Each structure stands twice: as structure tokens, then as C-alpha cells.
Amino acid sequence: MTAPFFFVVNPAAGSGRADTAWLDVMRAARASGLIFEYETTQGPLTATSFTRQALRAGAETVVAVGGDGTINEVVNGFFLDGALVRPGSSLGLIPLGSSSDIARSLGIPGGAGGLDILIHGRPLPVDVGHADLEDGAGRSFAYYFVNDAAVGVGARIAAGRSPLDRVGGRAAVFLSSLDVLTKPSPWTGTLQIDDGDAQEVCAVTVVAALGPYTGGGMHIAPGAKIDDGLFDVVVIDAMSSAELIANLPRIYAGAHLSHPKVHVHRARTVHIATEDRPPIELDGEVVGVGGATFNVLPGTLPVYLSRP
């Protein structure tokens, strides 16, 4: 491979609309003189495999073309056995999904706007989250994320979103939220922040946020920054379904942190233990159940962003 840029394209993103949108982006990239190669995904985890292959073959930048799921798979392709596959390589984003909280958190516009950042921006280091998880069979595994991890309701909303994606990203998440919040199912366990004592919790969700947005535009962690080396940990205690639905507009507006049942911590490490086995999502994808440990890897991955 000689091309410095390698695009990993998910043509199914945006309920299939990305297939046509990618053709426009590809023509614009060629017209700009950008030297690149690309591959289209064929199913789950192929984006991770393509990313590793491209990095090993000498690609300097791998560009995720699609939604949050595609971006997350590409991010995981940068790592293998706990280390970067190609130190010094960078990530680019062309958001073409129905909605992208990762791109929103990073300030990257969709389509041609994302391409413009590749051409005129520069890679800047951002934090990466590392998760130690368990699957449904109790097997341990590691996973990476660049925006958020959520234990509880957030993961259930993500799981319920897919059948509704045809109505649009943000609308699908909103409708899934209304459905899930009628059955909030709080979980009990312990939450440990860094080296502090483990505290008992009864929560509908705990979110370890690197970026401020989740759930198709929910402003869950207004103070979160992508490069400060810390999670903003948002804990929402057990609430009734009526209370949760009434406060949903406040979450979209980022005005929920003053609620007495909402608590915020800042942490490098978050450890959650529970026997209830609530679902866990990373960057909008449900990847595990039960407890988890989340660690921040500060400034680990350069991402193409607008020049300051």
C-alpha cells in the first residue's frame, strides 16, 4: 500500500443512504488530489479487520465513513493485544450515519465537511476509553471507545434503536428512549471512582463520558472534554418512569445535572460491580453485560480535527 489515507466505508450507514453519499465524497476527494484507497464493509467487525490490515500495510490515516458503530469498529482496529497497531497513525471521520454523537462531540460535520477537515485540518491527540467487560457467557474481553460508555438504560436505548433507524437517527433514539423509560429497570451494585471506596448505588444508568453527547444528541455530560484525560461520570439514580420521561428534555438540553438524583464525578478509572447484569454500550453499540472497569488512555489517538 502506498496511499497515505485508507477509507473504511459502511454503505449501510444512515439506513443505506451512505452508499450514495459516499460516491459524492469519493468524487470530491479525488478532485481535491487526496491520495487514498478504500474498502467497503460486509458485516460486523469487518471495519476493525480492514483497519488493522491497512495500518500494517503502511496507511498513515484510516478514515471511518459511516455512523458511530463504524467509527467504533475502526477505533478498535487501531489496537491489538493492548497496544497500537501502528504508533503515529491517525483517525479521520466522514460521518454519514443517521446521527453521530462521536462526530458531534468532536465538532466534525458530515459528508463534505468531514472531508474538508481531512484536507485542511490536522491530527490532534484525543483520549480513548479502555473497557474490561464480560459477555453473556461470563467471558472477559477488552474493548475501546472514544465517546462514552453506559451501563443500564443508555444501553437498552441503544439496543432498541436499530429497528427504528428507518425513521432517522435522532428520531429513532428518541422513540426508543420513550419506550425504555416506561420500564426503567434500575440496577444495584457498587461504583468505585479511581482509588476511592466503592459506594453502593441503585441507578438507572451510569455513563463514563469522554465527549459531551450520547443517544442521538442527548447532552449527557456538558462539561466533558475529549482531551483532558478524564471521564465525566454521570450517575442517574433510580427514578419512576414518569420522572424520567418528564426530565428527558432536560437531558437533551444539558440541564439535568442540577437534579437531586443526578450525580457527576470526574475520574481516570471507573469500576462497576453488579449481579444484575445490566447491558453495557460503548459509543452506541451494546457490547457486554454486568459490571465493567473503564480506564482513560490520555491523548492516545490522533484524530483529524479543525485547526484551532
Image (cartoon, rainbow, N blue to C red):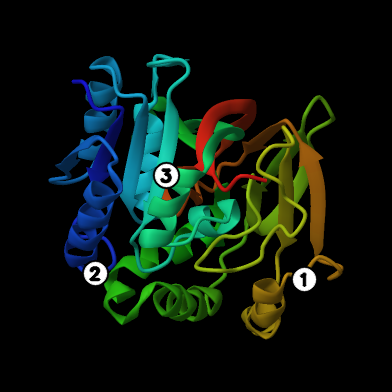
Q: What's the amino acid at mark 3?
A: Ile
Badge 1 local density, few (<14 within 10 Å), some, or many (20+)?
many
User: In this rendering, would 128 be left or right of 188?
Assistant: left
Residue visible at 43% across and 53% down in the picture: 116
On screen, 61 above or below 8? above
Local secondary structure at mark 3: helix
Give the CA separation, mark 1 to mark 3. Answer: 38 Å
Q: Quadrant of residue 260?
A: bottom right
The reply to whether residue 7 is visible in this rendering is yes
On screen, 5 above or below 183? above
Give the CA separation, mark 2 to mark 1. Answer: 31 Å
Q: What's the amino acid at mark 2?
A: Ser
Return the residue at label 2: 15
Residue visible at 21% across and 21% down in the picture: 2
Return the residue at label 1: 256
The reply to whether residue 45 is visible in this rendering is no
Q: Quadrant of residue 176?
A: bottom left
Q: Earlier in the sequence, mark 1 or mark 3?
A: 3
Local secondary structure at mark 1: loop
Return the residue at label 3: 119
Q: What's the amino acid at mark 1?
A: His
Badge 2 local density, few (<14 within 10 Å), some, or many (20+)?
some
